[in-house]
């Protein structure tokens, strides 16, 4: 497995941190489908598919003209982000986008589209830590908001209310699971300051409690009269 890919300025992969010998190889054997800006890479042609165009990192150019022509704000319709890949990206082959602009655009989207949008910005190594923190904050806020609507289920509740609460707890459980899957306690400054291992254990315990609450609600709902 490749833990971290190393890219040249043109985004050409030059090695992987867990394979020291690959750093000095002319054509490194990198076993990864998604490379620079997390777009699919074809090892046979050495080209990257950015949705609207194919990119050749060996020469730092697109294989075709920009489909939106000069609206991409570059008089050269073949070069990648105005020859400034350290400060900008082009995720879809249409127009250069600074990472700051791309992050802002993602954050304007509703949840969970904003998290998925930020996923697409990961992979280049540039500002990845900041992006992961933003994602974890979004997931954390989402499961807090979802949990605030859930109510403990008791047998005297109407069946419809039991089902609503069961669904509520289930949604919260899914979001908490996503939080843990993203290792957010190793990313968010508050958790790191508190001790990531302790924070993660606490969140795992809370997840187990919420899962049990969801299961109880579903069980009561199955027994309740309509």
Image (cartoon, rainbow, N blue to C red):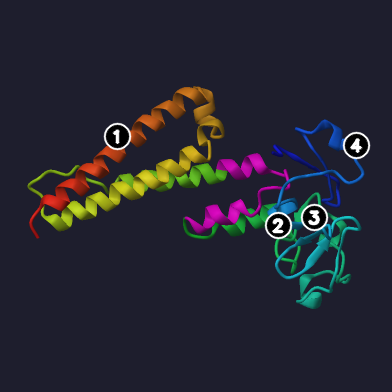
Which badge, 4 or 3, is on the more N-terminal residue?
A: 4
Q: What element carries label 3?
A: loop
Q: Mark 1 points at which residue?
A: 209
C-alpha separation, residue under disc 1 versus residue under disc 4: 50 Å
Q: How crowded is mark 1: few (under 14 residues within 10 Å), some or many (20 or more)?
A: few
Label 1 vs label 4, nearer the camera = 4
The reply to whether the magenta stretch includes residue 169 is no
Q: Residue 65: image x %, image y %?
A: 84, 74
Image side of residue 192 versus residue 150, left or right: right
Which residue shows up at 74% across the image and 61% down it?
90
C-alpha separation, residue under disc 2 versus residue under disc 1: 38 Å
Q: Name the residue under label 3.
A: 43
Q: Mark 2 points at which residue?
A: 39
Which residue shows up at 70% across the image and 65% down it?
92
Q: State which region is magenta.
A: 112-133
C-alpha separation, residue under disc 4 versus residue under disc 3: 18 Å
Classify the position of the C terminus by image quarter. bottom left
C-alpha separation, residue under disc 2 versus residue under disc 3: 13 Å
C-alpha separation, residue under disc 3 versus residue under disc 1: 46 Å
Which badge, 1 or 4, is on the more N-terminal residue?
A: 4
Q: Residue 154: image x %, image y %?
A: 12, 43
Which badge, 4 or 2, is on the more N-terminal residue?
A: 4
Q: Is mark 4 on a helix, strand or loop?
A: helix
Which badge, 2 or 1, is on the more N-terminal residue?
A: 2
Q: Mark 4 points at which residue?
A: 24
Which residue shows up at 18% across the image and 46% down it?
219
């Amino acid at each position: 497995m490749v833990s971290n890919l190393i890219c040249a300025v043109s985004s050409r992969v030059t090695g992987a941190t867990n394979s020291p010998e690959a750093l000095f190889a002319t054509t490194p054997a990198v076993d990864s489908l998604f490379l620079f800006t997390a777009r699919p890479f074809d090892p046979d042609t050495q080209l990257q598919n950015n949705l609207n165009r194919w990119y050749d990192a060996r020469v730092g150019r697109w294989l075709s003209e920009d489909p939106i022509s000069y609206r991409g704000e570059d008089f050269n319709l073949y070069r990648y982000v105005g020859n400034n890949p350290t400060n900008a990206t082009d995720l879809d082959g249409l127009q250069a986008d600074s990472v700051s602009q791309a992050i802002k655009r993602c954050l304007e989207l509703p949840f969970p589209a904003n998290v998925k949008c930020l996923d697409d910005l990961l992979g280049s190594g540039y500002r990845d830590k900041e992006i992961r923190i933003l994602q974890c904050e979004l997931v954390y806020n989402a499961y807090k908001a979802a949990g605030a609507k859930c109510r403990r289920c008791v047998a005297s509740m109407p069946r419809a209310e039991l089902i609503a609460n069961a669904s509520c707890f289930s949604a919260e459980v899914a979001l908490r699971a996503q939080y843990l899957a993203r290792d957010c306690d190793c990313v968010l400054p508050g958790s790191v300051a508190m001790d990531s291992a302790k924070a993660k254990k606490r969140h795992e315990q809370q997840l187990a409690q919420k899962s049990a609450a969801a299961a109880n609600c579903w069980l009561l709902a199955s027994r309740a009269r309509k």
